[in-house]
Image (cartoon, rainbow, N blue to C red):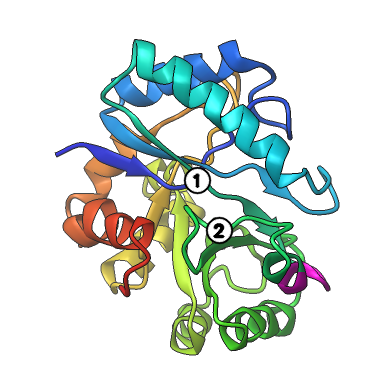
Amino acid sequence: MALIDIHTHILYGVDDGAKDINDSMGLLDEEREQGVDQVILTPHYGPKFGHPDTEVLREKFEAIREKAYKYYPEIQLYLGSELYYQQGTVSDLKQGKALTMNGTRYVLVEFATSDAYSHIYRAVQDFVYAGYIPILAHVERYKAVFGHVDKIVELIETGAYIQINAESLIGGIFDKRASFCKKIMKEGLVHFLGTDCHDFRTRRPNMKPAAEVVRKKHADQILYENPRRMLEGKSI
């Protein structure tokens, strides 16, 4: 069964990911080699890389989709965003300035690694109260959450879903980040896996080795069922 990558920076020329359409095609080719046949393009939206116009994003997305269909017809592409949470993010969503995941109520949200837990918790509440379903991107990076299973549980109970990066899962037994990711995955607290791929130098697609780890625990939900339901806007 082919894999679904819900977190990528393959959309070219908008953030620190793919620089041009050739980079995008190269990353998609690598995704294909990794056994991925559905990819969500999630460019950054926020203060660090700007607030790209949705029409520009859609134009670039269509250019990639047209070219990808020619060379990799087996790959299905979808458009979303990785939203850096700040005051006004929810308002931008409501006004159509920022994109949800494939036009659903799901939103991929990131924070600064040093953000306080109270800030992350309030953000989840903010999205939920506005009718959105937040997916917390690479939750293992946040110092306020890392190592605290109880906080992961509380965020889920508040309405969040949890995504971890493939790279974080691959580390060995002495890798603290990998150990934490495996722990929360074992306890059923991980809902999505994404590569967060940017380029071929330091952050390339690596879904296949991470999927091998996931297949030991809750594989169907994390790798297939949850991503499909999210793309369709269905409850998980």
Residue range corresponding to the magenta coloring: 86-91
Q: Residue at x 46, y 59 (%)?
A: 163
Q: Residue at x 59, y 23 (%)?
A: 199
In the image, 206: left or right of 136? left
Residue pushed farthest left?
Answer: 1
In the image, 84: left or right of 173? right
Marks 2 and 1 close (CB-CB < 8 Å): yes
**Quarter of the image containing the C terminus?**
bottom left
Give the CA distance from mark 2 to mark 1.
Answer: 8 Å
- Give, as a three-letter code, the residue at label 2: Ala
The local secondary structure at tag 2 comes to: loop
Q: Nearer the viewer, residue 204 or 51?
A: 51
Per the image, the residue denoted by label 2 is: 137
Q: Earlier in the sequence, mark 2 or mark 1?
A: 1
Q: Residue at x 48, y 85 (%)?
A: 150
- Give, as a three-letter code, the residue at label 1: His
In the image, 22: left or right of 175? right
Residue 137 magenta: no
Q: Nearer the viewer, residue 170 or 135?
A: 135
Percent position (x, y) of residue 45? 73, 51
Per the image, the residue denoted by label 1 is: 7
Percent position (x, y) of residue 55? 70, 41
Q: Is residue 186 above or below residue 200?
A: below
